[in-house]
Image (spheres, rainbow, N blue to C red):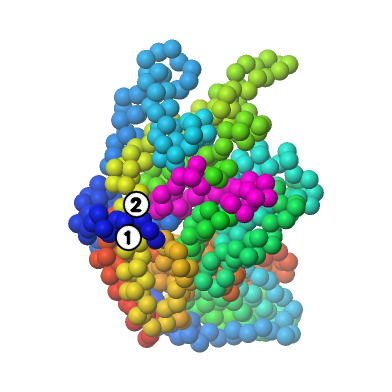
């Protein structure tokens, strides 16, 4: 990728760099089963830097109050830092305004919000929602629920054996009844980077809006929603070094303005009588109830943290780790990598002949190496490859080549045990 | 620290690599499907029961070493047992793989090799999937059981 080359020229990526970042994450000093923790389950959730932990604890220790409704000092302070977090997110993904940033619980809630608030009022029986064959369940099931409610149909764009989206098939499936394309930016099971620029261009040619599930991509790829031109972009805070329970739906203002509220309650109204309720402005219209204030502040701190390092530097470091890991495991007999797209990021899914992923996970855990084993909430991907699950190592900015070596050694140890 | 050798005993490897009774049963009069949604493992248990006695037992499925060995050992243990004996055996088995103490369970015979599972709580469901499916087969339930 072009940005990798740029960075190598600037000499930003050094092995020392990753070591420096590493000390920012206190949990990485933990020992597991008597061994140093090697945390390679970052696609499930990332660890938190001290800056995020401090932001949460400082908020509760000094600023805690409800937002948007108090005249007292603390409420104003809490409102200010909460809204500052929104602006940090707006800048991080280059949205046009902070109004386009809706706080939600996570990518899952963001997608459900779009399904229920944007799509549901518009859909007629036989209308189509287009997804890819490598979606996480959270970008499948909300559309199936919507189908039950409206009679709309889910259409699936196939992937090839390498795990790449078949763009020709996408072109064919994009039909007169397609009302929305909902597609991942980066596959959590395979690591494939989806060419969403092309997907968005093709969909927009037909006047079809596009939702990008950025749950995986947000911590690995620079995201610029205006350059992409996507209509919605969903992600979770906890996958980008922030807290759990907070996430973001970016939506183009024009679309969000036209959507009815997702949930009713406090904060999302401007006036209420028993006869008639006026809804609040964007983005509050979509934020019923007391929000996850601390979570939003923590996410803001996480984005400050990654911005200080730079998304391009992070992506380049992870690209180096992925290449190194791919090389390291390719020499292991009986190991098959699932997901060999030309454009990949941060995820190494694999199968070992004669060894179930669950057993691999247990044996690696005994070595202090945390990986994921199973279907990764993407059962249709597993069905596509005719397998029940894979073992998956996934990388973050704090991982090192030495940790990849520990993974490879653990895999060989597992094979050794099963050779008995 | 839990010892992996307690979990992966030689008998378990043997039953994983060469599972016993691992085939469909043409003359089965009870069967059920089981599923562990956590890992995607699936199993079908077949039984031929005559006059309250399990005359034959078999399984097919796709699972890890623990779940495959457990199913294999279970089908071996079931043959010739009275249906009424199954529940107490499963109860003992479940206690063995979940309890904190390391008390021996001689009544379980060969099934005792799975005792190491208790040190690995996330793997208990692997060991019990076949048993839950067996219970469903005895009731001849049509909807697949899950470990959840």
Q: Residue furthest top?
A: A71
Q: Secondary structure at mark 2?
A: helix
Stretch of the chain drawn in magenta: A200-228
Image position of A95 with respect to A156: above or below: above
Q: Residues within 10 Å of mark 2 (few under 14, many from 20)?
A: many
Give me the residue at 67% from left, 83% from top: B24
Image position of A219 with respect to A362: above or below: above
Specify whether residue B101 is in view.
no
Frontmost residue, A384 versus B34: A384
Image quarter of residue A34:
bottom left
Labelled disc at residue A312 = 2
Frontmost residue, A321 versus A91: A91
The residue indicated by pointer 1 is A5
- Residue A362, position in %: x, y? 39, 68
Frontmost residue, A119 versus B38: A119
Check if residue A205 falls in the magenta segment. Answer: yes
- Residue A321, position in %: x, y? 32, 64
Check if residue A226 falls in the magenta segment. Answer: yes
Give me the residue at 44% from left, 41% from top: A93
Name the chain under label 1: A
Q: Secondary structure at mark 1?
A: helix
Q: The C terminus of chain B appears in which quarter of the rendering?
A: bottom right
Q: The N terminus of chain B appears in which quarter of the rendering?
A: bottom left
């Amino acid at each position: 990728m072009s940005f990798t080359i740029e960075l190598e020229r600037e000499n930003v990526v050094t092995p020392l760099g990753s070591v420096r970042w590493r000390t920012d994450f206190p949990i990485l000093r933990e020992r597991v089963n008597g061994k140093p923790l090697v945390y390679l389950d970052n696609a499930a959730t990332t660890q938190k830097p001290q800056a995020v932990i401090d932001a949460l604890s400082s908020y509760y220790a000094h600023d805690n109050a409800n937002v948007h409704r108090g005249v007292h000092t603390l409420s104003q302070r809490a409102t200010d830092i909460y809204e500052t977090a929104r602006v940090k997110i707006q800048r991080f993904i280059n949205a046009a305004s902070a109004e386009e940033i809706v706080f939600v619980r996570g990518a899952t809630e963001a997608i459900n919000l779009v399904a229920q608030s944007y799509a549901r009022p518009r859909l007629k029986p036989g209308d189509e929602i287009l997804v890819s064959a490598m979606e996480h369940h959270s970008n499948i099931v909300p559309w199936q629920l919507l189908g039950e409610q409206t009679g709309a149909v889910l259409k699936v764009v196939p992937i090839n054996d390498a795990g790449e989206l078949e763009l020709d098939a996408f072109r064919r499936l994009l039909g007169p009844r397609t009302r929305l394309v909902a597609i991942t930016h980066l596959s959590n099971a395979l690591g494939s980077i989806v060419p969403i620029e092309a997907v968005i261009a093709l969909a927009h040619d037909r006047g079809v809006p596009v939702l990008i599930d950025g749950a995986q991509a947000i911590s690995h790829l620079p995201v610029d929603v205006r350059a992409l031109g996507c209509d919605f972009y969903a992600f979770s805070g906890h996958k980008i070094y922030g807290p759990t329970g907070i996430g973001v739906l970016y939506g183009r203002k024009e679309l969000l303005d036209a959507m009815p509220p997702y949930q009713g309650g406090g904060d999302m109204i401007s006036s209420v009588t028993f006869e008639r309720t006026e809804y609040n402005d964007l983005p509050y219209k979509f934020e019923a109830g007391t929000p996850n204030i601390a979570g939003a502040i923590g996410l803001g701190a996480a984005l400050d943290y990654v911005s200080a390092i730079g998304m391009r530097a992070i992506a380049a470091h992870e690209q180096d780790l992925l290449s190194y890991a791919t090389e390291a495991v390719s020499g292991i007999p009986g190991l098959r990598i699932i997901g060999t797209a030309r454009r990949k990021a941060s995820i190494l899914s694999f199968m070992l002949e004669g060894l179930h992923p669950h057993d691999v996970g247990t044996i690696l855990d005994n070595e202090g190496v945390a990986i994921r084993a199973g279907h990764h909430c993407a059962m249709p991907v597993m069905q596509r490859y005719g397998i029940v699950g894979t073992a998956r190592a996934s990388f973050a900015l704090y991982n090192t080549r030495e940790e990849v070596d520990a993974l490879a050694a653990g895999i060989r140890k597992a094979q050794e045990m099963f050779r008995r | 620290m839990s010892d992996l050798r307690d979990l992966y005993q030689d008998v378990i490897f043997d039953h994983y690599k060469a599972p016993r009774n691992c085939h469909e049963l043409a003359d089965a009069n009870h069967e059920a499907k089981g599923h562990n949604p956590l890992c995607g493992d699936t199993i079908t248990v077949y039984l031929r029961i005559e006059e309250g006695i399990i005359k034959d037992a078999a399984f097919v499925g796709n699972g890890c070493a623990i779940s495959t060995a457990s199913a294999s050992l279970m089908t071996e243990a079931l043959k010739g047992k009275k249906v009424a004996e199954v529940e107490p055996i499963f109860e003992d088995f479940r206690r063995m793989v979940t309890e904190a103490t390391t008390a021996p369970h001689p009544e379980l015979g060969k099934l005792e090799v799975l005792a190491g599972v208790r040190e690995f709580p996330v793997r208990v469901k692997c060991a019990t999937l076949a048993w839950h499916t067996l219970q469903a087969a005895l009731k001849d339930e049509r909807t697949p059981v899950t470990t959840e």
